[in-house]
Amino acid sequence: MPLLVMKFGGTSVADLARIKNAAGKVKREVERGYDVIVIVSAMSGKTNELVGWVEGTSPLYDAREYDAVVSSGENVTAGLMALTLQEMDVPARSWQGWQVPIQTTSAHAAARFVDIPRANIDAKFAEGFKVAVVAGFQGVSPEGRITTLGRGGSDTTAVAFAAAFAAERCDIYTDVDGVYTTDPRITSKARKLDRIAFEEMLELASLGAKVLQTRSVELAMRYKVRLRVLSSFEDTDENSGTLVCDEDEIMESKVVSGVAYSRDEAKMTLVRVEDRPGIAAAIFGPLADAGVNVDMIVQNISETDAPGDKRAYTDMTFSCPTNQVVRARKAIEAARDEGKFVYADLVTDSDVAKLSVVGIGMRSHAGVAARMFSALAAENVNIKVITTSEIKISVLIDRKYMELAVQALHDAFELEKA
Ligand code: ASP
Ligand code: MG
């Protein structure tokens, strides 16, 4: 039997009517001849509520019990989905993580998959069941405790099952109808993409296009799982939504596929640190230890200072999420107090946003950066930091210009045109 994985996010199973709607989509695939593994999230808002209950009970909670509580939202949906399918005469059975068993590491609240043995679910399909409804977001540790995968983890459960069961495709049903060239709330010219390459999606996912959990895209890329993002609120067919796939499956790609942004960035500069071997390690080691997610890093040319001082100095700039500025400052000041380095000043600019243009076509086309910079210049937007990779160019700009800049770049790369 060909097999499909269908994943329904929280808004798609928010109440009984929506579960019924989702079950209807599952039934249709069964009627087309597929065995189906359905991965469900908790009903929308449920996981937040459960997290709140844990924190309200025990501020410094035991992570094992956090997982025991927080995983329960998906169990409810899995059972309800199986019942709904049965009411529609579709033979379905629900599965909690430990019943499969979905084996993960013991990193509670941030567990990773170790193995998904097929035997139990395959045996049920062999008995004549058509659908296995699996609770997303959870697994079981080597110690036999329930684990969860980190917020948004049901996407990753879905891709992992698609890989383990060699599914024809993994359909991610959500509340948007696909992946767009940019955020449609920022420009009405944003266009839904029919296809996007794994690598592009990875950049867009990690840049804040919150459609898919980043890890799910990494996993899909590694195992070449064809992933489709589509709306559970519309009538859909094989061509709906956006297919996230290998670049070989994309016939003609534009140089730039999308413009992503991340609003809450901060830029920090260590002014006049001594420029010597080991200085970057001395700064970024403590930041990493403090759990600061450093993104862009720029080091200035170094200057020797006053006559008589043979030492060289430089400015070191990096970006991180705005809500990590305090933590970053503490880590740097502590390292300075321990004598790891000295600097003249530590300057923070918390009002910046990051903009990126992404596209696999950049590998074979020159001039993308120049086009991006001219488009920003034409709008008088000042660029504060620039970084590039093979398929991405990112800049930091003042946050107040973010919308304007996204629109300008969308126009400059003619993304409204297919
Ligand atoms: N319910 C979990 C969360 O809200 C997992 C998921 O929906 O992907 O993070
Ligand atoms: Mg999600």
Image: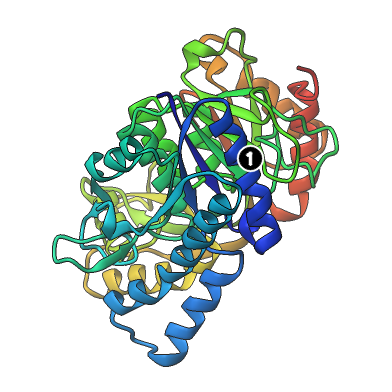
Which residue is situated farthest in the bottom direction here?
A: 57
Residue 396 visible in this rendered orientation of the protein:
no
Q: In this view, does 193 lie to the left or right of 9?
A: right
Q: Residue at x 37, y 63 (%)?
A: 343
Quarter of the rendering occupied by the C terminus: top right
Q: Which residue is drawn at 25% across and 57% down?
A: 282
Q: Nearer the viewer, residue 342 or 198?
A: 198
Q: Name the residue under label 1.
A: 25
Question: Tag count in the figure?
Answer: 1
Q: Residue at x 29, y 53 (%)?
A: 309
Quarter of the rendering occupied by the N terminus: top left
Q: Position of residue 285 (x, y in %)?
A: 26, 57
Residue 134, above or below 363:
below
Q: Position of residue 67 (x, y in %)?
A: 34, 71
Q: Which of 345 and 360 is in front in this view?
A: 360
Q: Which residue is drawn at 50% across and 54% down?
A: 82
Q: Where is residue 194 in the image (x, y as percent from the top left)?
A: 66, 23
Q: Position of residue 312 (x, y in %)?
A: 32, 47
Which residue is situated farthest in the right direction here?
A: 188
Q: In this view, does 296 lie to the left or right of 161?
A: right
Judged from the image, the secondary structure of the residue bearing numbered disc 1 is helix
Residue 168, above or below 56:
above
Amino acid, disc 1: Lys
Residue 343 visible in this rendered orientation of the protein:
yes
Quarter holding residue 108: bottom left
Q: Is residue 380 left or right of residue 272?
A: right
Which color mode does the image show?
Answer: rainbow
Q: Nearer the viewer, residue 141 or 357?
A: 141
Q: How crowded is mark 1: few (under 14 residues within 10 Å), some or many (20 or more)?
A: some
Q: Does the beta carbon of the residue at mark 1 sit less than 8 Å from ligand 2?
A: no
